[in-house]
Amino acid sequence: CLKVTQSSNPVILIDEIDKLGKDFRGDPSAALLEVLDPEQNSSYRDHYLDVPLDLSKVLFVCTANELDTIPGPLLDRMEVIRIAGYVFEEKLAIANQYLIPSTMEENGVGDTKLSLEDEAVRKMIRDYAREAGVRQLRKLLDKVSRKVALSMVRKKEEEHPAVVVGSDNLTTYIGQPVFLTDRLFGQTMPPGVVMGLAWTNMGGATLFIEARGRLPVEGVEIARVSIEGSPETEERERKPSESSPLGEPSDMQVTGQLGTVMNESSSISLTYARMFIRELDPQKSFLDKAQIHLNVPEGATPKDGPSAGVTMAVAL
């Protein structure tokens, strides 16, 4: 960079520094520690050329999508500036003014052969591409243009009618929606269901926590034993001597692929809910005796975080 710019104070952009790798050839983050440290980069020595370089006047700008994968010592030497992603209206304007015309031109599809309705673009942004940038949106537009171009090649161009892509036939070009915007419940939610907020890399989302409980059958205890991931159920008679002072002891099953922190939050929430109900009415012992199932929907998505205890306690 210094050779190309013929300057001692250029601006060097290091893109996606969170993707740094480390293997037998070396650790680039260790070299960047010396390069980005203002106390050391004035006498930086390049081991490949074996010449000293003064990098104290160089302005380094690094980009990253996530801070968690950047080594801690390297992150301490940088000033973090958080830039918000594009909102829905900005993505829509970028798509209409730049992405759609450029993808049509690159794939050899003119605006006379392909027409993207505004509602289809809106659905594409809302249900398929929720990331901070527009990279995924561009891939989806490329996919639509390539499919139209392929159908034009298979038929004679003059015989190929103009394709209109709307919200009703969008799934035939890019598949089913990745994100669902339909609410699981209407304006009123049943007892035991509470809506919370979840942080994601794409911004955030609403998260439902469902709690259900039932009292055990008299004289029968249902014990759930999990062996190598397959739940088995066995029933046995409980002797009167095993009963607790509050009746049958309560057990809670938690599902939804929760992490360690959220599992601990569920236990704390159950303990707090029991104490809170006892303070309101000492005669209410449902949470002490009931078999409770706490579920967080979308079980295929791992979930963890320190702030779910309040939502779980309200659901219980």
Image: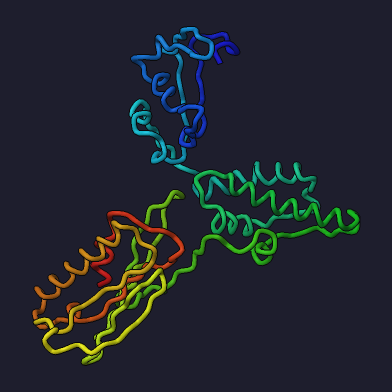
Q: Is residue 61 left or right of residue 295?
A: right
Q: Nearer the viewer, residue 41 or 106?
A: 41
Which quadrant would residue 40 be assigned to in this image? top left
**Image quadrant for the N terminus?**
top right
> Vertically, is 175 above or below 94?
below
- At 58% from the left edge and 44% from the top edge, which residue is drawn? 135
Q: Where in the figure is residue 177, as x and y percent of width and height?
A: 58, 62
- At 52% from the left edge and 60% from the top edge, which residue is drawn? 179
Q: How is the image coloured?
A: rainbow
> Vertically, is 208 above or below 99?
below
- At 39% from the left edge and 33% from the top edge, which residue is drawn? 81
Which quadrant would residue 220 be assigned to in this image? bottom left
Which quadrant would residue 233 be assigned to in this image? bottom left
**Image quadrant for the C terminus?**
bottom left
Q: Is residue 1 left or right of residue 253?
A: right
> Vertically, is 307 above or below 83?
below
Q: Where in the figure is residue 297, as x and y percent of width and height?
A: 41, 68
Q: Nearer the viewer, residue 8 or 187?
A: 8
Numbered label tally: 0
Q: Where in the figure is residue 59, as x and y percent of width and height?
A: 45, 19
Q: Nearer the viewer, residue 289 or 131?
A: 289
- At 37% from the left edge and 72% from the top edge, which residue is drawn? 227
Q: Is residue 272 left or right of residue 148?
A: left
Q: Where in the figure is residue 57, as x and y percent of width and height?
A: 43, 12
